[in-house]
Image (tube, rainbow, N blue to C red):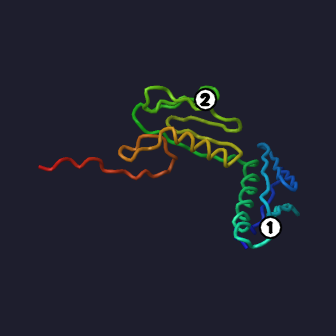
Amino acid sequence: MSRIGRAPIQIPSGVVVTIEPDEIKVEGPKGTLTQFTLPDITVSQSEGFINVTRANDEPKVRSKHGLMRSLVANMVTGVTTDFEKKLEINGVGYRVALAGSDLKMQLGFSHEVIFHIPAGITVKVEANVITISGISKQQVGQVAAQIRALKKPEPYKGKGIKYVGERIIRKSGKSGKEK
């Protein structure tokens, strides 16, 4: 049995979980999330806990067991507290500003890069740090990855957009011609 999959998920107060045969809906103070259920995986609710079980021990079913439990646990966490990712912009002349529902960035290109923020995501900008938050862990991670992909950090000077705490392995550059 999966160690992750067999752990029960505690339902905090203020969270309502609706389990249907093909969908799970979690409502909380921050919002509502829905997730389809995976085949051969059963999700049940009893006495303030959610349990995830599998139909058999086939490798494909076993691999989905822990995944389904993690997805449901992230939904319960998301509707009570927001998920958050922070990005840091490094480079001379690299700037970011929030303009309505868009991020306007100058990333060393000849033009300004505009990133439209999707619904359900909140973005804050403080100096050179972009904070992305929302109730869906998947959506927050996806938006952070899309913003980072606009200008990945380069290995020579470290210029670009990186996650806060991410370590960029530096290269030494040209060694020069020996005489």
Query: Measured from the top left, where is residue 76 in percent x and y?
Result: 76, 53
Where is the N terminus found, in terms of image quarters?
A: bottom right
Residue linked to disc 2: 102
Query: Measured from the top left, where is residue 96 in percent x and y?
Result: 51, 31
Please rate how many residues cluster around mark 2, counting C-alpha atoms within 10 Å: few if below 14, some from 14 to 19, many from 20.
Answer: some
Between 34 and 86, the residue placed more toward the observer is: 34
Q: Residue 154's image quarter?
A: top left
Between 119 and 59, the residue placed more toward the observer is: 59
Q: Residue 108's image quarter?
A: top left
Numbered badge on residue 53: 1
The answer to whether residue 125 is above or below residue 50 is: above
Q: Residue 90's image quarter?
A: top left
The answer to whether residue 124 is above or below residue 166 is: above
Query: Measured from the top left, where is residue 117 in percent x and y?
Result: 64, 34
Q: Nearer the viewer, mark 1 or mark 2?
A: 1
Q: Residue furthest left?
A: 179
Q: Residue at x 78, y 51 (%)?
A: 35
Q: Residue at x 61, y 29 (%)?
A: 102
Mark 2 secondary-structure assignment: strand
Amino acid bearing label 1? Thr
Mark 1 secondary-structure assignment: strand
Amino acid bearing label 2? Asp
